[in-house]
């Protein structure tokens, strides 16, 4: 009987120690940025993963120029518009979209696509694009270690700012 109690106690200890083991932190942690208007109305939300620079050359090397990029790491970045919005000259209905980019040295093409819950840009389908806008690349005041996104309020909307390494872009989102 004592042997049975000892074996049972050992099984409980092993099970308990395994149950409390957590996975390591993701190397490209997921983040979210939300834009709320002055009256606290939510206009847009972006969910994305934040890859790190780690002394690497990013654009033109790790992220190739002229190729569709998932705009971050891991799952493709998703943007939710809570109201109909104009992005550039294109009116986009409220909804959730994948936010792809095609980086270039002097400009990026920003793409909103109907496919959601996708990994990377491996199965990108241009026929499902809802909007495309080309925006100029700007030089960051200082190197940006982790890929980052934030909103900057403008009249009747916001600019979605995306930056990494030594550059950033601004995407206009105007309430339609």
Image (spheres, helix red, strand yellow):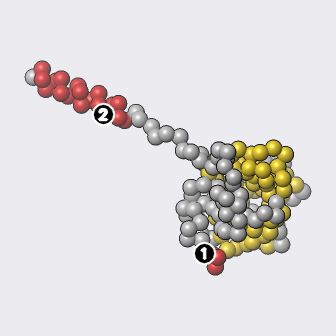
The x and y percentages for residue 164 are 73, 51
| Label 1 or label 2, whichever comes before in sequence order | 2
Gap in Å between the C-alphas at discs 1 and 2? 46 Å
**Disc count in the image?**
2
- Examine the rendering and report whether any part of residue 174 can be seen: no
Circles 1 and 2 in contact, beta carbons < 8 Å: no
- Residue at 67 percent across and 68 percent down: it is 67
Neighbor class of circle 1 (other Cα within 10 Å; few <14, some 14-19, many 20+) is few
- Residue at 84 percent across and 56 percent down: it is 138
Which label sits in the foreground, 1 or 2?
1
The x and y percentages for residue 107 are 80, 65
- Residue at 78 percent across and 70 percent down: it is 133
Residue furthest bottom as drawn: 127
Residue in the foreground of this view, choosing between 114 and 57: 57
The x and y percentages for residue 47 are 64, 53
Is residue 118 rendered to the left or right of residue 63? left
According to the picture, the residue beneath numbered tag 2 turns out to be 15
Neighbor class of circle 2 (other Cα within 10 Å; few <14, some 14-19, many 20+) is few
Residue furthest left as drawn: 1
The x and y percentages for residue 114 are 63, 71
Relative vertical location of residue 91 with respect to residue 12 in this rendering, above or below: below
SS of the residue under disc 1 = loop
SS of the residue under disc 2 = helix
Which quarter of the figure has residue 61?
bottom right
Residue furthest top as drawn: 2
Question: Considering the image in quadrants, where does the C terminus appear?
Answer: bottom right
Q: Which mark is residue 125?
A: 1
């Amino acid at each position: 009987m004592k042997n049975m109690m000892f074996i049972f106690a050992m099984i409980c200890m092993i099970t308990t120690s395994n149950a409390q083991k957590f996975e390591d932190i993701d190397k490209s942690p997921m983040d979210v940025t939300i834009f709320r208007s002055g009256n606290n109305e939510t206009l847009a939300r972006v969910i994305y993963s934040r890859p790190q620079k780690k002394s690497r050359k990013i654009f033109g090397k790790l992220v190739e120029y002229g190729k569709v990029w998932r705009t971050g790491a891991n799952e493709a970045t998703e943007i939710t518009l809570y109201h109909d919005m104009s992005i550039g000259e294109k009116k986009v209905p409220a909804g959730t979209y994948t936010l792809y980019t095609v980086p270039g040295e002097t400009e990026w093409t920003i793409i909103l696509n109907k496919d959601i819950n996708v990994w990377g840009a491996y199965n990108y389908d241009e026929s499902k694009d809802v909007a495309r806008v080309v925006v100029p690349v700007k030089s960051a005041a200082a190197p940006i270690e982790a890929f980052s996104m934030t909103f900057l309020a403008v009249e009747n909307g916001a600019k979605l700012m995306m930056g990494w390494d030594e550059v950033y872009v601004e995407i206009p989102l105007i309430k339609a």
